[in-house]
Amino acid sequence: MKSTVEKIDQNKVVLEVEVPVEKFEAALGKAYKKVVTKVTIPGFRKGKAPRKIVEQFYGPEILFEDALEIVVPEAYFAAVEEQGVEPVDQPNFDMVQLEVGKPLIFKATVTVKPEVALGEYKGLEYQVESVEITEEAVQQQLDSLQKRHAKMAVLSEDAEAQMGDTVTIDFQGFKDGVPFEGGKGEDYHLELGSNTFIPGFEDGLVGAKVGEERTLELTFPEEYHVADLAGQPVQFKTVLKEMKRKEYAAIDDEFAKDVSDFETLDELKEDIRKNLQTQAEQAQDREMRNTLIEKAVESVEVEIPSAMVEERAEQMLQDYGRRLEYQGLSLDKFLEMTKQDINGLRAQFTPEAEKSVKRDLVLQAIAKTENLDVSEEEINQEIETLAANYNQPADVLRKLLVDNGQLDNLTESLKADKAVQFLVDHAKAVEA
């Protein structure tokens, strides 16, 4: 097989590929075996007509479509590898020579990954700030622990509900005096101040006592997702059936024993301080790395093919849909509630998708320029780490990555990590 490549645009090339006559002939032979079972020729049983007769009766062109499906993809990918181009979209094929008894010649026009002319990426500066964990920060963590371990106490019938209490209520909503769908609840547990209900509902229960009935005159928000209720005045009839209030333990040595493995409050506070210190240093490291990446990226001008941006935006959209489903909401339902269409939502991801693609291109260029390769041992180590996180055997995960074509993505991700570390190793720290 022969191939040549010609650059016709900033990010577009034309591959001309010549498939040897014997290889094209073999593909025609396979195509004949498929076609002969489908055609009818007088004097021959279906599937028994010789190839020469089939070609005489229908013309040799009847074999071309199936033959091209057999030979063109293989020849195209071989040419891509031979010429070292990196396609980012599907090619457009044009047949140059398509005749029986001659080599097959075709052209493939395809968008390729752009070349990146790197700017400054060595000696980039970043600010260093000292990390100091204050007593106030430690106390905030203790307060959070106290709230998480609070106990709920049932209040007496003469107690009045206040924000933060959890009440058990029955309620029924009415619009124009008629109950509306979805407006009824029985033995519903509601934390006052959680903003679970429409504005005014929870405020309207403050001061109520167990057994008390209240009628709340409210208005649904204009942007409410149910069109028939949006902006409409309604009435809720409520009955408060039970009321609980959080009781907080004193923050002392006993508290430390109850909520941790430590014997004293001082030990717990020291552990909190160490964890906060680690978190702050990790956050500072992430910020430093992001700063260096942004500086390396902003010095680069590159024309990014729209196909790359569209693919990344689609990935972001799919990821967003999965996050919604994890929260119990389908993407279709979200679009209905927010009165959007899928194309509009996808367009919202486009600016960030373009930034993400540019970032990847720059890191890939740095890795290539600095010969930051990834060894098989490093790939295996990463697979073992991922397998441990997913609680499955490493060989099973490797096969899954190979079968889904994700092993190359893993390799590129490791190269990108090395490129970021290169930026860090060659950066200059400046006191803030």
Image (cartoon, helix red, strand yellow):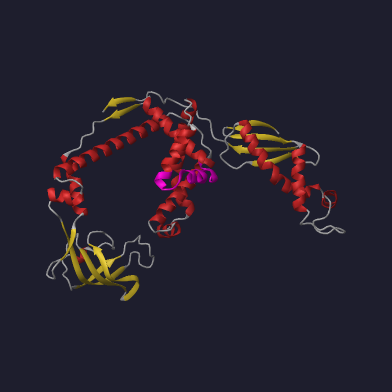
Q: Majority secondary structure of the magenta segment? A: helix
- Residue located at (61% from left, 38% from top): 110
Image quarter (top left, top right, bottom left or bottom right) of the C terminus: top left
Q: Which residues are magenta?
A: 387-406
The residue lying toward the viewer, choosing from 175 and 93, is: 93
Where is residue 423? Give x, y as percent: 39, 28
Query: Residue 209, located in which quarter of the rendered image?
Result: bottom left
- Residue 291 falls left or right of residue 315: left
- Is residue 297 in view? no
Where is residue 58? Give x, y as percent: 82, 52
Task: Assess whether residue 160 is covered by the magenta stretch.
Answer: no
Where is residue 164? Give x, y as percent: 19, 59
The residue lying toward the viewer, choosing from 420 and 89, is: 420
Image quarter (top left, top right, bottom left or bottom right) of the N terminus: top right
Question: Furthest residue to the bottom?
Answer: 177
- Residue 393 falls left or right of residue 126: right
- Residue located at (26% from left, 61% from top): 199
